[in-house]
Amino acid sequence: MASKFARPALALVATPVLAALLVGAATSGGAATPGAPGAGDPYFPLSGNGGVDVAHYDLDLDYTPTTRRLEATAELAVTATQRLSSFNLDLSGLNVDSVRVDGRRAGFSRNGTELTITPARTLDKGRRFTVVIGYSGVPAHVYDPDGSPDGWIIQPDDSVFVASEPQGAMTWFPSNSHPTDKSTYDVEVTVPDGWTAVSNGRLRDQRHRAGKTTFSWREAKPMAAYLATASIGRFQVEQYVTADGLPVYNAVAPSQAAATKPVLDQLPAVIEWETKLFGRYPFEAAGAIVEDAPDVGYALETQTRPIYDRAPSIGTLVHETAHQWFGNSVSLTKWQDIWLNEGFATYAEWLWDAEHGGLSTAQQFAADYALPATDPLWSFPAADPGDGGHIFDKPPYERGAMVLEKLRRTVGDKAFFTILKTWATDRRYGHGDTRQFIALSKRISGKNLDSLFNTWLFTAGKPATP
């Protein structure tokens, strides 16, 4: 995500007092138990759910911009990870009209952002089952703890900016909304003719009927729910295939087209450059969504097709594209580790600048280190934001990049770039945490890096020496 520095703090959507409820009583036999209402993340206690793993989402959305009403069906392919008497999904607002589990009508109840589903029969551990949920209403975004809007964000011109990091997926579809559960997606969106609906992956089909157009998208690689999008606007659309055979789909608000074109024209070159650094591009499509949404205040690395609130700079394009490796393909296991996404994407910007006439990475590091100890850069360690209200503050981005520059200086270029490429390759489509990255760095470099990481990644305040 492009940084959301210096946002006013608001209250968390979920209260910490509920944290004790978040560990499900997984059982291999005996009595069935309810799945936990959250995945156990201390920063967002009610994000995600216990007892279920979602392999695939099939979303059928029918949206009318003038009324802002959504009529939708979500079909989820799920595996029970414990013996379940009931299970939860995340859903904010919207009306649930019906729920079926394996074709049988299921009971359901709502409590805040939790949708609790009680199947007609107990679901044994390891059981694969389908859940079909009919729902409708006027979607509304939520606010993150830093005060920024998150999810289905309706614009004054009735377009929809859909960016869901970290918890906004629940505003437009019932989901197991935590990065630890990654799934494939089919997203079909029907809108009035003249509007375009853009999602992740490849456009499979576009068909017209009775004054409406249906766009069918498929993301065949695993994706965390927060990276899904279904953005809607009166876009100018550009489609082409790169020299390497990668299909590109760009959707740009007309007001942003002139400023956007010289930047998006560089997307193939950016992907090629990052591929050399980080390994094979991990997905089957690329592109961008550019809206005219200045009040949103950020861009997001929605998988295969980042979304921008305005015409992006080349630095922002490099940043969000780097996230396709760091954050999207290799995902977090807890939000505390956000530096593994943002520090890496910020360092990609530094590398691009260094190779394209800007400051060297050493000069970028020196400029940051010159900031006084009172600067927000030093307000907390990169690997310990403290709570969900600070994960998009300056330290995970800039200090995270400084950690990588220190690592590079210590282990040398050959080992450093081997570490980055190995991290992205060995964990492709999976997960990684800070402990595992440190272990990889030690193994590849053959060096004891404890002091470096303790000082630059975990210690509060400005380090005494650069």
Image (spheres, rainbow, N blue to C red):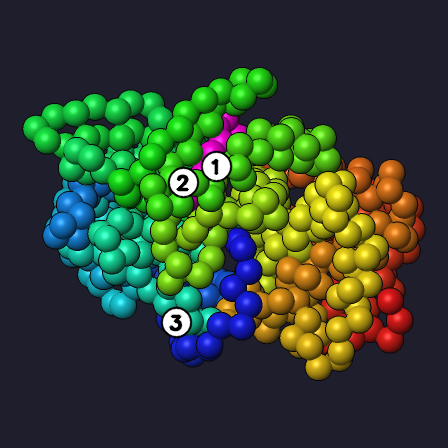
Q: Residue shown at 27%/40% (left/top)?
A: 234
Q: Could you tell whether 419 is left or right of 121 in the image? A: right
Tell me whether the residue at label 3 lies in contact with that at label 1, contact meaning CB atoms closer than 8 angstroms.
no
- For the residue labelled by badge 3, is the local secondary structure a helix, a strand or a loop? loop
Quickly name the residue at label 1. Answer: 261
Compared to 180, does 382 lie above or below? Answer: below
Compared to 256, does 189 lie above or below? Answer: above
User: Whole-Å distance between the Cαs marked 2 and 1?
Assistant: 6 Å
Residue 51: where, in percent of width, then height?
Answer: 41, 52
Whether residue 161 appears in this view of the structure is: yes
Q: Judge the density around disc 3: few (<14), some (14-19), many (≥20) Cα neighbours within 10 Å.
A: some
User: Whole-Å distance between the Cαs marked 3 and 1?
Assistant: 41 Å
- For the residue labelled by badge 2, is the local secondary structure a helix, a strand or a loop? helix
Q: Which mark is residue 14?
A: 3
Q: Residue shown at 75%/73% (left/top)?
A: 371
- Three-letter amino acid code at the position of disc 2: Ala
User: Disc 3 or 1, which lies upstream in sequence?
Assistant: 3
Q: Could you tell whether 150 is left or right of 7 in the image? A: left
Residue 12: where, in percent of width, then height?
Answer: 41, 73
Tell me, yes or no, whether the highlighted magenta stretch contains residue 286. yes
Comparing 297 with 93, the one in front is 297
- Three-letter amino acid code at the position of disc 1: Lys
Residue 43: where, in percent of width, then height?
Answer: 51, 68
Tell me whether the residue at label 2 lies in contact with that at label 3, contact meaning CB atoms closer than 8 angstroms.
no
Quickly name the residue at label 2. Answer: 257
Q: Residue shown at 31%/54% (left/top)?
A: 152
Look at the image and tell me in which quarter the C terminus lies. bottom right
Which range of residues does the magenta coloring cover?
282-290
Quarter of the figure with residue 443:
top right
Comparing 253 with 255, the one in front is 255
User: Whole-Å distance between the Cαs marked 2 and 3?
Assistant: 39 Å
